[in-house]
Image (tube, rainbow, N blue to C red):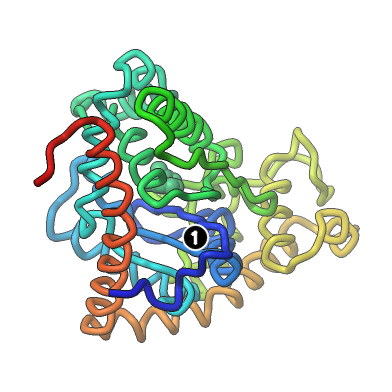
Amino acid sequence: MTTGNTQNAQKKIILSGIQPTGTITLGNYLGAVQNWQRMQADFNSIFFIADLHALTVRREPAEFRQTAINFFAQLLACGISPENAIIYFQSHVRQHAELAWILNCNTYVGEASRMTQFKDKSAKHADNVNMGLMDYPVLMAADILLFNSDLVPVGIDQKQHLELTRDLAIRFNNRYGETFKVPDGYIPKTGAKICSLQDPTAKMSKSDPDQNATVSIIDDEATIVRRFKRAVTDSGAEICVREDKPGISNLITIYSAIENKSAAEVEREFEGKGYGDFKIAVGEAVAARFKPIREEYARYISDKEYIAKIAKDGAEKAAVLAERTLRKVKKKVGLTSF
Ligand code: TRP
C-alpha cells in the first residue's frame, strides 16, 4: 500500500505521543496538541495515543479502553487531521514493542534506573514499581527511532528521555553501523509549561486528583470559568509576571497563549484591574477557545465507525514505515530471516 498524502520525502518527520489518562487538559493543549495541529501540514507528522506507556500504571480495563478512544476523538476535535498526519494507537503497531525489546538489550539498568521520571513515579506508585515503569523511556526511544524522526515535540519533563533516545541511537549506530537517525527535541516556547490552577508551582497534570487544578478541553464554559475563579493567586494586587507571583504568572502565560499576545501586552491590558476581573477574563477566553473543540468532540465520539476507520488506516500506514526500520535492525543485530 502507499503511505498516502501524509508523507512527502521533502519534509522533515515529526513524531509525538500522548498518554491516554483523564482527558486532554489546557496544559496538554497549549504545551503539545495545539503545536501539533499547527505543525502538521509542514512536516510528515506522526501522532499516536501512547496506550502501552499508560499501562505502566494500573488501569481499570473498561475505563482505560474508553479513555483511549476518547483521547483519539479529542485529537481529531483539536484539528489533528488524517489528511495531514498519521494518527493511531501505539498498541496497534506491534513494531513499537518489538523494537523496544532489541533496544532493551542495548540499554543499561544503571542508566534506566537513573531517569528522574522513573524515580519520581517509583516513589508515587511504591506498591507497583513494575518493569514497564523502568522501561518506559526505552519504549519511547523505540517510538521515536522506528520512524527516523527528525523532531520530537515534547514537554520539558521529557527532555531526559529524549537524551536517552539519542544516546541509544548513537550507541546502536556505533555498535552495528549506521541505522538510526539521531533525533532532536523540540520544546515549543509558548505554553511549554502550564501549571496547576491550585498549585502554580507544579505542572498541570491530567492525572491530578484535584479537579479544580485542571481544565479539560471538553469542559463546558461554566466549569471553565468557575475553575479560573477559584484559581490560587498570590499576595499583592498587581497583574504581572514575577518569580514571587507564580499564580498570576501562570494565568498570564495562559491568557497570552490563548489570545496570542505577549506577556507585556497582557500586563498593560490589565493594568490597574483586580485579580477577580483578570481571572474571569482568562476563564472566558479559554472557554471561548474550547467551545468549538467541545462541539467537534461530541460529533466524533458519537461516530465510533469513523474513529475505527481513521485509527485502522493510521496504524496501517505507521506499520509500513515502522517495519522498514525494524527489518533493518533485526538484520543488523544478527537475527535470522528466511
Ligand atoms: N512520554 C510522553 C509524555 O508523557 C508520551 C510519549 C510516549 C512520547 N512516546 C513518545 C512523546 C514519543 C514523544 C515521543 O509526554
Residue occupying image coordinates x 40% and y 53%: 17
Q: Residue at x 74, y 55 (%)?
A: 275
What residue is at 69 percent from the left and 40 percent from the top? 246
From this viewpoint, is residue 280 visible?
Answer: yes
Which residue in the protein does label 1 denote? 215
The local secondary structure at tag 1 comes to loop
Corner quadrant of residue 258: bottom right
Which quarter of the rendering shows the N terminus?
bottom left
Amino acid carrying mark 1 in the image: Val
In this view of the protein, which residue sits in the foreground, 131 or 243?
A: 131
Q: Is residue 243 above or below residue 90?
A: above
Regarding residue 226, the answer to whether it shows in the image is no
Q: Nearer the viewer, residue 71 or 169?
A: 169
Picture mark count: 1
Question: Could you tell whether 134 is left or right of 44 in the image?
Answer: left
| Residue occupying the point 52% across, 79% down | 291
Residue in front for this viewpoint, 287 or 297: 297
Q: Nearer the viewer, residue 91 or 252?
A: 91
Compared across the picture, whether 150 is left or right of 108 comes to: right
Q: Is 50 on the left or on the right of 270, as rendered?
A: left
- Residue 239, image x and y in percent? 81, 51
